[in-house]
Amino acid sequence: MSLSVKHLLGIRDLQRQDIELIFQTADQFKEVLQRPIKKVPTLRDTTIVNLFFENSTRTRISFELAEKRLGADTVNFSASGSSVSKGETLIDTVNNILSMKVDMVVMRHSASGAPHFLAKHINVPILNAGDGINEHPTQALLDAFSIRERLGSVEGKKIAICGDIMHSRVALSNIYCLKKLGAEVTVVGPPTLIPKYMAAALGVNVSYSIREALEWCDVANVLRIQLERQNTPLFSSLREYSLAYGVNRELLDSLNKEIVIMHPGPINRGVEINSDVADSGQSIILDQVENGVAVRMAALYLLAGKKTE
Amino acid sequence: MVNGKYSVAYQAFLIISFLSVAFNHYFWPLKRCVLKTILNGRQMAITIDRLCHQLIENHLQFENTVLIGLQPRGIYLSGRIHQTLLKLVPGADIDYGKLDITFYRDDFNQSKTLHVPSETSIDFSIENKKVVLIDDVLYTGRTIRSALDAMLDFGRPASVELLTLIDRRFSRQLPIQPDYTGRTIDALISQKVRVLWNERDGNDEVILID
């Protein structure tokens, strides 16, 4: 058994068996993380570079912990304070790092497709840690893993993805991942934040009413408004967005069932989600973060096994 | 082909030869030749009983002893031994865990296929306990080396013993020897020892295949 891909660039390239293999492996890593010594020596001969051309808290720490707990050596790189500001190209930067005998690359970049471009030019496994508005595969894997953990399986479950669908790589990766695992997906948000032809292209339902979507779903994955990616104003104000699409306690209490609330972070409290929802027992936001390490360990382990092929 | 270019007999010959090639290709693992039976079902039951009695000789009430079976194949043997011991030592409460060694292997970069990990469940402390590691076949000793590493991450045991059903002697690559052995055999490197279990394979048997 091994993955059908050499790089983890996006969920789009994965088969359902790949996702299930990652989950099966992540289950065992989750057990490792409960032990008194949370570290295994599997990748002790592997050096991994974390290339972060864009800001990150969770993903970066999560990847670094996953690497360290697999016994790998890690090198961190962030664009600010590097020679990128002196005009070095992406390929030059990466090739210089790789010539120092690095075996794997974890990469986040603000340009969609940057890791795909790099994959054509370098020979080591690449893990996409988020590229522009395209994909964020490990986030989608840990989201689906958390749903599977909470509800037993993903197959047949109804999942609403709420908020800024247009600019969210988490949304796209989640849609691919959940559809491949046999779940039903509805995207919900203001019409200006949902791309046209979404339903036809990706096989999801589109809704413009948050109440309707929450009444339908088992799980709601609430996304942050990606103001840094919006060049033109797409809604009148954050306050108005919050009134129309924010998930709050009154809204959840008025539903006739208890749904599971997820958020990939960082949370803008009081905008897309209120504190009384984010911190309630319905929310699995911190479980998602916890599972992130195990899922990333699984992805690194399975891809590292590919590096000698 | 259908419009009479070839005779019916020739067409039939083509189809049959294609099917036989496909069959051999698909089922070749079944055609690996079974050289001999090392232990049959009855012998296996007697051997497992004997191993249990040897364990009782050294550990009496098992108050400070834990059993750990190695995933994926050793757990059938360890499960049987645990069950038999519970019957033979009335009133004993014997801790029994399963240990997966996938993440501790020394051939991660050498092996062609990636190993998919199995479950580890050790829900007790092994600190200062006498640990009995259980696996079905002892061959190069590398699995046991990995198991020792994996086990030490759970604590520092007072002592560790090794129990195996089959010991392939003269083939060790590391200085590791069993403390309890079901049967010692000599086999060529090309040969394989398969332990079949009722729970998984439908019958209890140890066979030598080539």
Image (cartoon, coloured by chain):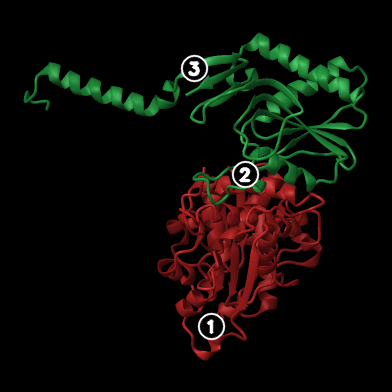
Whole-percent x, y for residue B61 in the image: 92, 23
- For the residues labelled 2 and 3, the Cα–Cα distance comes to 36 Å
Q: Nearer the viewer, mark 2 or mark 3?
A: 3
Write down the residue under mark 1. A231
- The chain that appears red in the image is A
| Chain ID of residue with mark 2 | A
Q: Quadrant of residue B62?
A: top right
Q: Secondary structure at mark 1?
A: loop
Q: Secondary structure at mark 2?
A: helix
- What's the amino acid at mark 3? Leu
| Chain ID of residue with mark 3 | B
Q: Is residue B65 above or below residue A259?
A: above
Whole-percent x, y for residue A217 in the image: 64, 51
Sequence-first disc among 1 and 2: 2
Taking the spot 79% from the left edge, 49% from the top edge, the residue there is: A35
Taking the spot 77% from the left edge, 14% from the top edge, the residue there is: B49
- For the residues labelled 1 and 3, the Cα–Cα distance comes to 74 Å
Q: Is residue A29 above or below residue B7?
A: below
Could one spot residue A251 in this view of the protein?
yes
Circles 1, 3 touching at the beta carbon (< 8 Å): no
Taking the spot 50% from the left edge, 22% from the top edge, the residue there is: B209
How many residues crowd around disc 2 within 10 Å: few (fewer than 14), some, or many (20 or more)? some
Name the residue nearer the viewer: B127 or A127: B127
Taking the spot 49% from the left edge, 63% from the top edge, the residue there is: A124
Whole-percent x, y for residue B150 in the image: 73, 45
Q: Quadrant of residue A222?
A: bottom right
- What's the amino acid at mark 1? Asn
Name the residue nearer the viewer: A264 or A260: A264
- What's the amino acid at mark 2? Gln
Name the residue nearer the viewer: A231 or A124: A124
Write down the residue under mark 3. B35
How many residues crowd around disc 3 within 10 Å: few (fewer than 14), some, or many (20 or more)? few
